[in-house]
Amino acid sequence: MTENGLFQIILYFVTLLLLAKPLGVYMAAVYENRPVLINRLLAPLEAWVYRFSGVKPEHEMRWKEYAAALLWFNLFGGLAVFALQMLQAYLPLNPQQMNNVSVDSAFNTAVSFITNTNWQGYSGETTMSYLTQMLGLSVQNFVSAATGMAVLVAMIRGFQRRHSETIGNFWTDLTRGILYILMPLSFVLALVLAGQGVVQTFKPYHTLPLVEQVGTATEKTTQTLALGPAASQVAIKQLGTNGGGFFNANSAHPFENPTPLSNFLEMLLLLLIPAALCHTFGTMVGDSRQGWAILSAMTLVMVSLVFVTVAYEQGGNPALTALGIEQSVGIDQSGGNMEGKETRFGIVNSALWATATAAASNGSVNSMHDSFTPLGGLVPMWLIQLGEVIFGGVGSGLYGMLVFVLIAVFVAGLMIGRTPEYLGKKIEAFEIKMAAIIILIPAFFILGGTAIAIMVEAGKTAVANPGAHGFSEILYAFSSAAGNNGSAFAGLSANAPFYNITLGIVMLFGRYGIIIPVLAIAGSLAAKKTVPTTLGTLPTHTPLFVMLLIGIVLLVGALTFVPALALGPVVEHLELF
Amino acid sequence: MTNQIKPALLMLLSFTVLTGLVYPLAVTFSAQLLYPNQTNGSLLGTNEQPLGSELIGQAFNRPEYFWGRPSATSPTAYNGGASSGSNQGPTNPALIDAVKARINALHEADPGQLDAIPVELVTASASGLDPHISPAAASYQISRVARARHLSPDSVSELVGRYTEGRQWGVWGEPRVNVLKLNLALDQRI
């Protein structure tokens, strides 16, 4: 790696950590309904939303009511996205006259967007009308992100409250997250991105004459340029850890990510809210060190893995070295394994993005992970399999990580022979049972789904690359669906009934199979009393605890997935090197 | 639990209007006002005679033009209506065959060029629309373009230098050459 490459990586993490604190404190104020400038300005809008929807903002919900509100809201959201796709040919704002989407694909996409996965079996610029992108997909980008954040806030209230039967109001958490956090930030970012060259228009696609006119009848003399209202959607897809590209190539497409600066901003926004929420947590529980401890654990794992991916991608493909191709880095090229990467991003920004998008459960890509070197591609896959808790999705990453924290204090409690406590709450059998379910569900669906796919013909024929790499494509697909990530080893032809349906089901369990037990934990914790801190209490803000937490996350992830990874990326690595 | 059905429907309706109509329309209106060219695809040339988009590469195969990255879009290369990478894995025999074919095409077009081929000239970009190549990939092609156009290599090299962009703000991304702009400059159309 060059000095500049190292500098770009350091600059990225420093900027991220600097911005996380103020945003995190601001978000705590928003969710605790303390007055800040913007909610004074937009308060009439918030009040209108409640009045229109018949919601009483002061009403407090028990965890089951909170879950019911969330599930109904997500169900109707899914039906709306499904209906828009099934009817788009008859609806306005469809200048390219896109057909209605097939039933299985529409189901898959609807599930994918309500679960904040944004797995894309379809290709944006050849499938979706502008109306579907805006009214269906953009909306779910906002509300699925706000849903994740709401669940996190409910869980934090579980730690805050004592002898309480309720954990807040889903509608106010949802509304404040959208109006005061996601919409203002997206608006600003969308305008900056538009200035860099991200398109934002309702015009039909351009058809332009090519500079090199080939002149024979079989060759094209014009080029079609796909357009659309992209900037508004790209901003929220990065910010809300959604990741669903407006165009098929996602943030590798020059109209979606035109310059190195737009790339830096999109990559920064990708981890910003998940990082900031650690401070929101620290602020809300009244001990900022707790937030720092979790953020440190996430950052340490992520930074170490970035360097693995960068090293393997920069090393290039030995099979091309054998053909005499120049892959070394120099002042006039970034070198390395450039198949599936864009020149303006080079190796460092492609590898950094791949690691960040997998860590964050975002799933947008600026390079094609399918073409990564075996171990360069193993890193994003494993980060997803860790449970999307290294930063993770907005809200979902931190509530997932807090579940690992409960496991960590439980393990520590077993070692020292004391009832485990966290933030003054006793962690008992019910919480640990729920935590076990939360950890087992993704593992079950990733490994079970992969096993089924490699046993049936429809699963195997979709594979694009032969050998061990084909197995990696399937394993990545189910990991991505269960982790609600959405990135892919995209050679897999997943837009067929088998994968549309199986992956759709896996996404549903990967989302709501976690959210419901998390809310149950929140309800159970809120009802407990707070026990006073004594000399025997395990401190959970120390470097020792950070290491214990990292150890638990990596151990569970490694024990569960190393055998499967050995059959895919590891075999391929041994073949290649 | 059914008492949440009505608020769920109405909340969805509120946020469909706010985030699905008001927000994208506000962004479109502001962005079109601030950046009329960028929001419509960063076109080069005039409205009557557009020369392509500055951000989207085009296919070049003749020796007198600089060639861009190989493109995996279908049915033709650099199809701006259907972006795509090759998604070929590093051990895929199809990738190795494709690279060999690209090596042969480069050698046939310029048999005297014996330098090692820069990797970007034989590997497909992620979008299939990459408008750039590295300065190394441009240098490699100077001798061919100069001969085909009966120009001195120095004058072509000087033009390449003029169309080489550094890192953005000196920090971000990689140095690169915009292939379409360079070729238009060779044709003296910009």
Image (spheres, grey):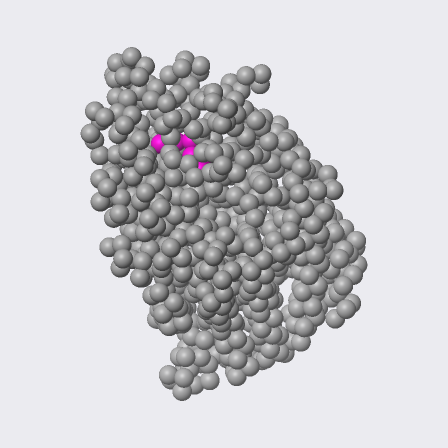
Prevalent SS, magenta region: loop
Q: Residue furthest front?
A: A217
Describe residue B143's horizontal placement relative to residue A385 as left or right: left
> Count the marks: how many?
0
Q: Residue at x 42, y 36 (%)?
A: B71
- Above or below: residue B53 compared with residue A179: above
Q: Nearer the viewer, residue A378 or A73?
A: A378
Relative horizontal placement of residue A525, taking residue A563 as reference (left or right): right
Residue A530 visible in the displayed image: yes
Which quadrant, please, contains the C terminus of chain A? Answer: bottom left
- At 29% from the left and 25% from the top, the residue drawn is B109
Horizontal arrangement in the rendering, residue A298 relative to residue A509 (left or right): left
- Picture coordinates of residue A403, whole percent (x, y): 49, 71
Per the rendered image, the range of residues in magenta is B128-133
Q: Nearer the viewer, residue A312 or A349?
A: A312
Residue ID at (35%, 65%): A567
Q: In the rendered image, which quarter is residue A466 located in?
A: bottom left
Quarter occupied by the N terminus of chain A: top left
Q: Position of residue A432 (x, y in %)?
A: 51, 79
Kindly tell me whether residue A39 is visible in this rendering: no
Q: Residue at x 52, y 48 (%)?
A: A238
In the rendered image, residue B131 lying in the magenta stretch gets the answer yes
Q: Position of residue B5 (x, y in %)?
A: 76, 63
**Where does residue B49 sit, x and y in percent of width and height?**
54, 16
Nearest the viewer among A139 and A533 is A139
